[in-house]
Image (cartoon, helix red, strand yellow):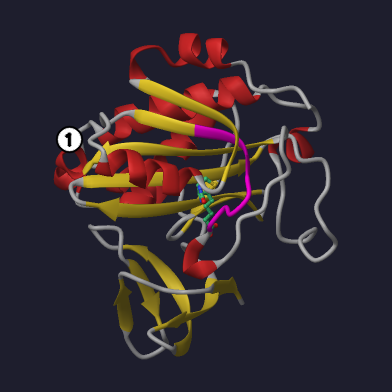
Amino acid sequence: MTPLDTDKIVSLAGDSLVRLYYKSETSSTNDDALELAKAGAEPGTVILAESQTQGRGRRGAVWMSPPGTSLTFSYLTSHEYISGASLYPSLLAGLSCVRALKQLGISVLVKWPNDLYLNGKKLAGILTEMTGSYLVIGIGINVNVSSFPSELQDIATSLSIEIGAPVSREKILAELIKSLHQTLHSSASHIDGLRECCALTGRAVTLTTSGRRIEGHVRGLGDEGELLLWTGRSTLVLNQADEIRFA
Ligand code: BTN
């Protein structure tokens, strides 16, 4: 395994990176970030790990990623910066990732509310958590993963699989940090950008929300990033959903 070159990350990310904690192994970078937040860490701090022993996904899921081929990191920010943005933090984080990858010529979509999709498969997951005035944005992205277990093969992918060649993890991470910094610190409206990269718009889906299973057709996103779901009789405006499947 070739470890990440932290000097390269620091130099590529420039002023957007306030402080970088690099660990070869940790339980979860989100847990580390939450601890650092409680100790008063500076917004813009990044916690990066080659591997996690207890990586966490949404709804209590486990996040697994092979060391040396993925990026697992958490970006610490403050509500102060994002409160004017009106969109949900995970959507802003997703949009930041879309913009970062676009800079590198890779076109990905946000599968509302917290996944990144590339060619119809999951490329990355985002887990946002809060403590006090801090927001922790945890991102796991499959960069150079060459294969997935059979049960994931049809639903997960990596940048190297889709591009057909290995990709620099350092470049990807630096671009993600720069984009998070720019997007989260900008007071501009991000809703148009998000609408453009919404993987669900126009699609028939089945989802569960508050224990109810609902089928519908996604009309798009509301002004604050809510999912607008046409059920055949009315449009539901959702700010939360558990599993969402393409019908
Ligand atoms: C999901 O798809 O359910 C979200 C996955 C989020 C995984 C990342 S990896 C870095 C950070 N640390 C964690 O424990 N989880 C997030």
Q: Position of residue 158 (x, y in %)?
A: 71, 42
Q: Position of residue 62 (x, y in %)?
A: 60, 61
Quarter of the image containing the N terminus? top right
Left or right position of 221 against 206: left
Task: Give the image quarter of residue 152.
Answer: bottom right
Q: Which residue: 37% across, 33% down?
A: 180
Report the magenta residues as a range.
Answer: 48-56
Q: Is residue 42 above or below residue 89?
A: above
Mark 1 packing: few (<14 Cα in 10 Å), some, or many (20+)?
Answer: some
Left or right position of 214 against 81: right
Q: Position of residue 194 (x, y in %)?
A: 37, 48
Q: Is residue 94 visible?
A: no
Mark 1 belongs to which amino acid?
A: Ser
Q: Is residue 50 visible?
A: yes
Q: Which residue: 77% across, 61% down?
A: 154
Q: Which residue: 17% across, 35% down?
A: 187
Q: Which residue: 35% across, 71% down?
A: 240
